[in-house]
Every structure is written in structure tokens, then in C-alpha cells.
Amino acid sequence: MPTSVCPECEEEVYVDSEMEQGDQVSCDECHSSLVVVGLDPIELDLREESDDYSDDEDYESQDYEGDRF
Ligand SMILES: [Zn+2]
């Protein structure tokens, strides 16, 4: 299994051999969300929290549930 180095804690991170660029992995050591930015060699970068804007959808579904009460 190929490995790379976590940019956060510099521990070895196992990367699935079927991973592709842009795929996300988690560091077992520090549990950071990482994204595969290179494959040869495998490079990992921290996934920015601000990229995760699916929160908007959660907010709407909460609002919907609120209407039922
Ligand atoms: Zn780490």
C-alpha cells in the first residue's frame, strides 16, 4: 500500500492504491482531512474547512423539520 506524509503531523498516511487526484483521505494520527494533490509521488494537502459548504443543505433540512413541529 502506498504511503505519503501528512502535512499536518508528518506521520505516514496510507493511501489506497486506487486513490485518484482530488480524493480525500483522513490521517490516522491527527484525523486531519487530507486531499490527494499528486500521485507520483503521492502528495497530500490539508483540506480546507471552508471548502465544506454542504452545511447550507443541513441548515435547510433543519428548517424543514422545524415546520413540522
Ligand atoms: Zn496527520
Image: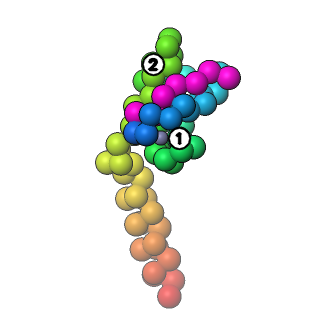
Q: Is residue 35 above or below residue 50?
A: above
Q: Which mark is residue 38?
A: 2
- Secondary structure of the residue carrying tag 2 is strand
What amino acid is found at the position of numbered circle 1 in the picture?
Cys
Q: Is residue 6 above or below residue 67?
A: above
Q: Position of residue 10 (x, y in %)?
A: 44, 34
Q: Which mark is residue 27?
A: 1
Looking at the rendered image, the quarter that the N terminus falls into is top right
What amino acid is found at the position of numbered circle 2 in the picture?
Gly
The verdict on residue 46 being magenta is: no
User: Of residues 4 and 51, which is closer to you in this image?
Assistant: 4
Q: Is residue 43 above or below residue 47?
A: above
Q: Residue furthest bottom?
A: 69
The verdict on residue 4 being magenta is: yes
Q: Position of residue 67 (x, y in %)?
A: 45, 81
Query: Which stretch did the figure color magenta?
Result: 1-7
Q: Residue furthest left?
A: 50
Q: Position of residue 35 (x, y in %)?
A: 45, 33
Q: Which mark is residue 68?
A: none
Query: Is the residue at mark 1 in contact range of ligand 1, meaning its CB lies under 8 Å from it?
Result: yes
User: Of residues 62 and 24, which is closer to you in this image?
Assistant: 24
- How far apart are the alpha carbons under marks 2 and 1? 16 Å
Q: Is residue 62 visible?
A: yes
- The residue drawn where x is 45% and y is 72% is 62
